[in-house]
Amino acid sequence: MNTNLLYKTCIGCAIALIIAALVGGVIYYAPEPDDTHEYSDSPWDPNAPKHPVTINSTPSLPFVDSGRKDQAGNPIGVRCNTCHSSKEPNLTLNNGALLHEFHQGLHYAHGGMNCVSCHNPDDYESLRLANGESIPFSETIQLCAQCHGTQYRSYRDGSHGGMTGYWDLSKGPRQRNTCTDCHSAHAPAYPKVMPVFPPKVREGSKLPSQH
Amino acid sequence: MSSSSSGGCGGNCSCNSGGGDNSDSKLFDRRTLLKTTGATLGIAAFAKALAPLTEWSEDLSVEEFVQKHYRELDDKQLSEVIKKIEADTKAEYGADVTVTAPKPQKGVKFGYALNLSVCVGCRRCAEACHIENNHDRASGNSYIRVLEMEKGSMDLEHGNANYNHPVPRGDKFYMPVQCQQCDNPPCVDVCPVEATWKEKDGIVVVDYNWCIGCRYCEAACPYHARRFNWEKPQIPKEEINPNQSYLSNRVRPQGVMEKCTFCLHRTRKGQMPACLEACPTGARVFGNLLDPNSDIRKVLANKRVFVLKEELGTKPNFFYFFDK
Amino acid sequence: MADQPKHDAKFHYRSFPRFILLALKLCTQGSWTFYAWMIFLTCIALVGANAWAIQVRDGMIGTGMSDHVSWGLYIANFTFIVGLAAGGVMMVIPAYLYKNKDMHDTVIIGELLAIAAIIMCILFVVVDLGRPDRFWHMFPLIGKFNWPISMLTWDVLVLNGYLLINLHICGYLLYKRFLGETPNPKLYIPFVFISIAWAISIHTVTAFLYCGLGGRPFWNTALLAPRFLTTAFCAGPAFIILVLQLIQRLTSMPVGAGAIKTLMGIMRVTIWINLVMLVSELFTEFYTGGSHATAAKYLYFGSHGLNALVPWIWTSTIFVVVAAILLLRPKLENHMRTLDIACVLVFVGIWIEKGMGLIIPGFIPSTLHEYVEYIPSLMEWKVTAGVWAGGLMIYTLLLKVAIPIFTGEARDHYPQKKAALNDSKAHESNDPEHSAEST
C-alpha cells in the first residue's frame, strides 16, 4: 500500500513541478508592462548645439611682482621687457640659485634644462617652441605639449587635468584647468598632499590593520 | 508531560470541557487564579517589552507603508510622495530641499574611467561624495573607498584603505573603488523584493521606500559598493545638500540600503558627478558610452583599460587604466 | 480504534474547535517542572523581544555588524536552525520508506521539531531585517517577488511550504487520534514523501543563498550544499535523541529503543561524511593557498592581528572529531551516557561550525580585502536568546499537546458523553422515577 502511494506521490509531484515550471516560464518571459519611468521625454541628441569648454587662461602678458604696492594696495607688477629689453640674455643659465639680480629664490626643478629652452631670449614677453617659433604666454599648453605629448593627448581627450561643469555640453559649459594650474612651470612635479577624510571604523569593531 | 499531579480527576482533562455542571466551585480555585494572574502578567510584560516599537512607529506613516514600488507609481502619485519626502525632511532636519525624479535619457549609457597614473590618493572624491550625498556625518560614510596599492601588484590583499601620510608615495598607486554599475549586477539578482534594479542609462538604483533591509545585496556585491543605514542619518541642517532626487541623494531612512548612483540627480541633467569635480588631478573621466566622441569612449579606444574582478562576469561600467 | 466513518463538514465544524480547545487546555496544565520551564523561557523571550524592539527603534547600529560584516549572529543561527528543521525529517525516512515500526510512532517528535524550527527560522530572518514593517513587499502580486532569480525568494517559498506540510501532517494525525479514528493514508502519506524531498530542498536552497555569490570565495564552493545536508543530518538526530530521552523520562509515551538506535546509526555515518567533506574543503583552501584561502586562514589561524574566531572553530572541530570517535563505540545503545555526550558535542560543534564559523569568514576579508572583525553585541545575544527561547516554548507546547493525544490520555470524549446523555434521557422518558446514571 505504501509503495503504491509512493509511486503515486512521485508522479503527482512530477506533474506539479512541470506545471509550475510552465507557469513560472510564462510569468518570467511575459513582456513587462511599460515602465512609467523608463525614459525622459527628450532623447540625447548628438547634434544639439554645444556649450563652450573654457580652459583657465594663463596671462598673455606676464608680470613680476616688484614687492611694492600702489595707492589702492594692489601689487605693482613689472613687465619682463622692462629689464630684459636691455640685458644680455644668459643662454647657459639653468639653475635658479644662480639668479642674483632678480628672481632670487626661484625654485627651478624642470629637468635641468636651460631657461631659454622655454623662454624666448629675443622677447622675454613671449615663449619659444623647439623650432624657434615664438608663442604668447597664453599658449603655454602648446609648449608643454611639445615634450609631454602623452600627457597632452590624455589632457586633450579628457583623462588628465581637473574639470568642472557638464559632461553633456549640450546642457551646459565646462571649465578646465590648464597645465600650470597644477604644475608650476619652473617646478612642475605634482606636490605631495595630506589625504583628507580617512575612512572611519564602526564603534565596536576592531580597527582594520595598517599594512 | 505526565498529568498525574494535576488537580481534579486525574488524567482525562477533556472531562471538564463539555458540561459546566461541576465547574462553579472550580472557578476560583487556586490553580486557575494563579494561571490567570500569570497570563495577565505575561501579557502586560510582553506589551512593556515591545514598548519601544510605539516610539519607532511615530516615524512611520500610513502613506509610506502602503506606497507602491517606484516603478509602479504614476506621475501624480510620485509627486505626492516627493512632496511628503520634502515635508518630512523639513520636519526632521529643518532643511528646505527640492527632490526631483529625473528619468534616464534615451541614447545615454553612463561610463566612468579612472586614470591610475594620475590619481594621487588625496581622497577628495570620497569627501565630495559624503557631502553631495547627504551621508550621516558621524559615520563618515562615503560610497568611495580609496585603496593604496603596491606598484607592480593588482592584489587587493596588499591594498590599504587606511593610509594617513603625504600622498602620493613613490612605490604605491591609488585606486578609488565605488559602485561599478555592472551590466550583470549580482546585487540586482539577489534582491528578494526588486528594490534595486538597473535603469536604462546603466545606473543601478535603490528605491529607499521599498527596500526591506535584508542586506543580501551587500553580501552579493563583489566591490563593497553598498552601504546600509545602520541608524537614522544625522546631518546638521546647514550641511544638507538641497538638490536631491528620489533615487539618489535624498536623506535616506533608517534600515535601508544605499549606493553610489553616479550622482544621477546631477548627471541626468548633464552635469558631472561630484567626485569628478572634486578630483584635483583630473584622474576621473565620465561620459556617455553611446557617444562615439565622448571622453570616455576616447579612453576606451586609446588606453589599455581593465576592470576589477572581470572573472566574476559582472561586466562593470567602471574602467581603470594607466597612462604608462 | 474505530473504523473511519464518513464525516460531513458539519461534524468537523463542531469537533475541530473542541480539538483546539483541548490543545489549549493541555498547553496550560502540567507539573511544576513544566510551569518552571515555561516561565524561565518566557522571561528570556521577553528580554529578547524588548531588545528587538529597541533594535527596530534605534537602528541596527546597536548590533556589532558593519558594512564590512553585514550579516552576523542572526543569520548564523538561521542557517543552523534550517538544518535542524531538515534534520527532523531524518526520522521520517526510516519510518516510512523502510517501514521501521519503532520509528513510526515517534516520527511525530521529529515533525513537530521541524515546525518549531521553521518558526524560529522565520523569526531569525525577521529580526535581521532593517525594515520589518515592510514585510508585505515580499508577497507576490501585492508586493514584488523576485522569483526565480533571487535565491531568497526560493527560500521563502520552501520554508513556508515545509511549515505547511508539517502542520498538515501533524495536525491531521493528531486530529484523527483525538477523534479516535485511524488516519486515512491517502491524506497524509503522500505529504510525508513530499516532506522528505522538501526537507532536502530547504537546506539545499539555503546553501544556494551563499554558494552562488561569486564575490564571496569562502562560500562559493560546490561542496557547500552537501556539507549543509550532512551537518543537518548530524545535528538533527543529535537533538532528537536527547529529546526522546527527555520524553522517556518525563512522560508516559513509549519510546522504542529502536528509534534511538536508528538515529544513532544514522549519525555515526553522517558525522564521518561531514568530516571527510570538511577535510576536502580545507585541503582545497590551504593547499592552493593564494587569496582564495584568506578567509579560511583568518578562521583557523587568525590574520592581520585578528583572531576572534580561532578558539571557537578549533573547539568546534575538536568537539565534532571527538563525537565522531565516541559514536564508533560498539553497542553504543547500552552506553547512553556516551551517546548523550556525543550528541551534545555534535550539536554544539555544528552550531559553531555552521553558524558563526560559516557566515562570518565569508565577510572577512571583505570584497576589497579589508579585515574588519565582528563581535556580536549584547543586544544581538539577547535577541538570539529570545528567539531560541520562543522556539523551545513552541516545541514544548507542541509536545505537550501531541504526546497525551498520541498516548490516548487525551481524547475527544464528547461523542461518548453525548451518547450517555441520550441514553439517560431515553431512560428518563421511559422511567421518570429513576435518576440518570452518568457514565
Image: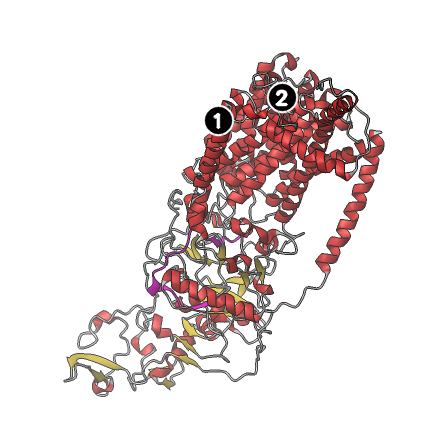
Q: Quick one: SS at disc 1?
A: helix
Residue A134, given in percent of the width and then of the height, sits at 36, 85
**On screen, residue C376 above or below C269:** below
On screen, residue A9 versus residue B75, left or right, reads right
Q: Amino acid at mark 2?
A: Leu
Residue closer to the observer: C229 or A120: C229
The residue shown at (37%, 66%) is B95
Residue C348, given in percent of the width and then of the height, sits at 53, 27
Q: Quadrant of residue C81?
A: top right
* Residue under pointer 1: B34
Label at residue C387: none
Task: Tell me the chain of label 1.
Answer: B
**On screen, residue C73 above or below C406:** below
Question: Magenta region: which residues?
Answer: B222-245
Looking at the rendered image, the disc whose residue lies closer to the viewer, 2 or 1, is 1
Task: Tell me the chain of label 2.
Answer: C
Q: Amino acid at mark 1?
A: Leu
- Report the predominant secondary structure element of the magenta stretch: loop
Residue closer to the observer: C167 or C353: C167
* Residue under pointer 2: C244
**On screen, residue C325 above or below C93:** above
Q: Is residue B227 magenta?
A: yes
Q: Is residue A112 magenta?
A: no
